[in-house]
Image (cartoon, helix red, strand yellow):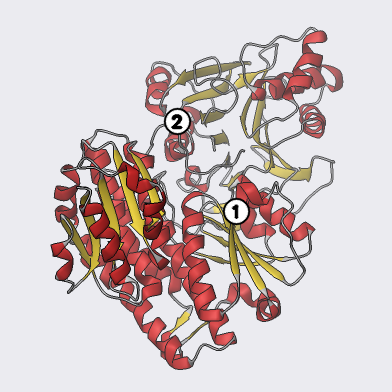
Amino acid sequence: MCGIVGYIGNQKVSGILLNGLKRMEYRGYDSAGVSILTDGSIETIKKSGKVAQLEKLVDHTQFDSTIGIAHTRWATHGEPNDINAHPHHDSSNKISIVHNGIIENYAILKKNLIEKGYTFRSDTDSEVLAVLIGALYDRVKNMEEAVRYALNEVEGTYGLCVLSVYEPDKIIAARRGSPMVLGIGEGEYIVASDAAAIIQHTRQVIYLSDNEMAILTRDGYETKTIKNEKTTNTIHEIEFDLEQIEKAGFPHFMLKEIFEQPDTFRDSFRGRLLADKGNVKLGGLTQAEEQLRKAKRILITACGTSWHSALVGEYIIENLAQIPVEVEYASEFRYRNTPLYPDDIVIAISQSGETADTLAAVYETKQKGATAIGIVNVVGSSIARSTDAGIYIHAGPEIGVASTKAFTSQICVLALIGLYLGRMKNLSQSDGKRIGAAMLEIPNQIEQILNKSDEIKAMAKKFTKSRNFLYLGRGYNFPVALEGALKMKEISYIHAEGYPAAEMKHGPIALIDDNMPVVFIATKDEIYEKVISNIQEVRARRGKVIAIASEGDNDITNYADHVIYIPNTVPMLTPVLAVIPLQLMAYYMAVELGCNVDQPRNLAKSVTVE
């Protein structure tokens, strides 16, 4: 979750580190800090709160150094305060580290180090790693060896950068289960947990693998495993532009990303959808084509918003391909003995491609001999490199912590997979063409909804005093109800729950009174009349009804207090359109309430630790 950046080169380092932290602040914003090597010592400045608070302190100092490391934290062990902020030092203040991950055996390591006379200042597991490296350096007098020995002793996960006065022209980076990217510039190197911190300096990057170290000097770099085996790496080029991680005139990244969805949905099917043939071409699945053709069961595993898109995918694939699909929370998949068979397909969905639980589910899948397929957004991410086959959603960088455009792009890719599998099975070409034509229309239809943003904003303001919301949908739109409720919770801190509409009578109806807004996804489909019945049950109890309805449905105004119309499409694509007003409603309510939309409290973008 945390953001890490390290730099060694010929430029003044303080500005580079601070800019890198700002680019990654969506990964964690409980505290931030820098360590800069200058005049034979390590100068460390760190502060609880946002990077802007750290910047005020660094601005009052003068550093001419060209080497340093920095960190922005999402707290795991130890509360978010100045002491627990990174970087952390060894006992002698000669070594500084920044760390993302969890050291699971930190307690026993700390006990042993204290018994040997080493001291600690913080409550974090990360400081234990710093002190351990220092203790090992006392013995071996070689930084690379000290780091390598330490990483062989620790259990858990890490993305790591190490700086020391002992070897002042060197940064050592390493990773296990937490992303680290090495940017290769002209006489300079920048290492970070996210390519967003690198793009301003270079497009040439190496993605470190698990249990791999990088040793950086101004003259070059070397990579090896923590077992001291040299490695070779492919240099990749960052695909996105700097402009894509700027706000481009929008007040928040979240709003910008909501408005990008016509383009991001189109980019997800571009070059893949063969609408005139009623089929798709998915080169990323070529290696698993035979396994997919023979599959008797598909499991989809994900977390959060990606889990909601997985539910939509379940309905799509079962309908088009007639293959049984199960959706599992990745956090549960990894810890229960999930039955898996060689002819099973497991699809892992993660925007970042680094979600710890989802990545663990991929490892479990491969351990049991099933085929693992990834649906991710970030090129070179751990899940992308660990699966047998996969598809990038091509949504571009998503900076807002509350996912929006990734959700609709994930549904696009799942629809492509459903069409791909359906045409392998019994789906007719004419049905394929009908679906393909509908997908081509979606970007323009999203635009039509976005043009109503002022109308949605005005409606949202009427509900800012509500402390609870209920979201209800059926069929394809049940997952949309879950996602709408999640968005409201994430950024406005208003309690909201999503349910299948028919389940309302099995408990939630007890909550409904004249203070309870109830959002219905009530589009015209084969179960429309059932949803209308559910709306009437809410109205009978004086609940306030907000309906997401199909264009041309004038009857809905007889039942709802507020109606937001969306264009008509095939039922399986309705979630893409229905979720847009819910994203906007959550956004405008959060803004009206004065919430930090892009950086909601207690949340971070990528959950890379348990």
Q: Residue at x 69, y 16 (%)?
A: 90
* Residue 577 position within the rendered picture, expressed as x and y whole percent measured from the top left: 31, 65
Q: Earlier in the sequence, mark 1 or mark 2?
A: 2
Marking on residue 29: 2
Q: Would residue 299 be seen by someone viewing this image from the given angle?
A: yes
Q: Give 255 or 132, whichever is nearer the viewer.
A: 255
Quadrant in which residue 444 is drawn? bottom left
Residue at the spot of label 1? 381
Q: Give 38 or 374, whichever is nearer the viewer.
A: 374
Q: Give 376 or 33, whichever is nearer the viewer.
A: 376
Q: Quadrant of the N terminus?
A: top right
Report the side of 220 relative to 51 (left or right): right
Instruction: Examine the rendered structure and indicate whether residue 446 appears above or below residue 153.
Output: below
Q: Mark 2, residues whose alpha carbon is within 10 Å: few (<14), some, or many (≥20)?
A: many
Disc 1 to disc 2: CB gap under 8 Å: no
Q: Quadrant of the C terminus?
A: top right
Quadrant in which residue 405 is drawn? bottom left
Q: Secondary structure at mark 2?
A: loop
* Residue 150 position within the rendered picture, expressed as x and y whole percent measured from the top left: 79, 29
Report the side of 166 relative to 602 (left or right): right
Q: Secondary structure at mark 1?
A: loop
C-alpha span from label 1 to label 2: 22 Å
Q: Residue at x 51, y 80 (%)?
A: 320
Q: Residue at x 40, y 27 (%)?
A: 50
Q: Would residue 246 be seen by someone viewing this image from the given angle?
A: no
Q: Mark 1, residues whose alpha carbon is within 10 Å: few (<14), some, or many (≥20)?
A: many
* Residue 348 position within the rendered picture, expressed as x and y whole percent measured from the top left: 60, 59
Look at label 1 and name its amino acid: Ser
* Residue 595 position within the rendered picture, expressed as x and y whole percent measured from the top left: 29, 34
Report the side of 142 relative to 268 (left or right): right
Marking on residue 423: none
